Every structure is written in C-alpha cells, then in structure tokens.
Amino acid sequence: MGFVNFMRSNAGRLLRIVAGLALILVGLFVIGGTRGVIVAIVGLVPLAAGIFNFCLFGPLFGVDLWGRSAEDK
C-alpha cells in the first residue's frame, strides 16, 4: 500500500495541489478555449483534494476519503 501511504503524507498532499494548479494553468494558458476551461475545471478536483486534505482514491484502497484506514477510526 505504498501509494496510499504516499497520498496520506504531506508530500502526497503537496503533489495534489501542484497537479491541480498545473492543470488549471495548462488549461487556461496553453490549451485555451472550451477544452482549456474543461481541463481547468478538472484541475480544481486535485487542487481541492490537496487543500482540504482528502483523497478520492482512498475508498479504492480500503481507506476513507480522509486517508484513515479501518483500524485508525
């Protein structure tokens, strides 16, 4: 479960924030147009996940959205 442990760490949180910002900037300034706006909107998901410290992949790996496993609760 290395991926889950990484995403629960501060480095994983920082990665989600950076990825979200990158998608937003690429969408608005590189792609442009309607497709760029869509990419920017998609970039809001990892940005919000990093800022509010949740991971949408958590339930796929047996932990909740906030990164707590069943034994942590």
Image (tube, rainbow, N blue to C red):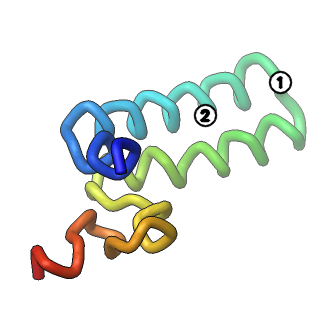
The residue shown at (40%, 44%) is: 3
- Residue occupying the far right of the picture: 34
Do the CB atoms of the residues marked 2 and 1 lie less than 8 Å apart? no
Rendered image quadrant of residue 53: bottom left
Question: Mark 2 highlights which residue?
Answer: 24
- Residue occupying the far front of the picture: 1
Residue 29 point in image, percent of width and height:
71, 19
Residue 25 point in image, percent of width and height:
61, 25
The residue shown at (83%, 27%) is: 32
Crowding at label 1, few (<14), some or many (≥20) Cα neighbours within 10 Å? Answer: some
Q: Amino acid at mark 2?
A: Ile
The residue shown at (49%, 48%) is: 46
**33 or 60, nearer to the observer:** 60
Residue 28 point in image, percent of width and height:
71, 29
The residue shown at (26%, 63%) is: 67
Please say if 34 is above or below 4: above
**19 or 29, nearer to the observer:** 19
Residue 68 point in image, percent of width and height:
21, 69
Question: Mark 1 highlights which residue?
Answer: 31
Tally the marks. 2
Q: Amino acid at mark 1?
A: Ile
Q: 41 left or right of 34?
A: left
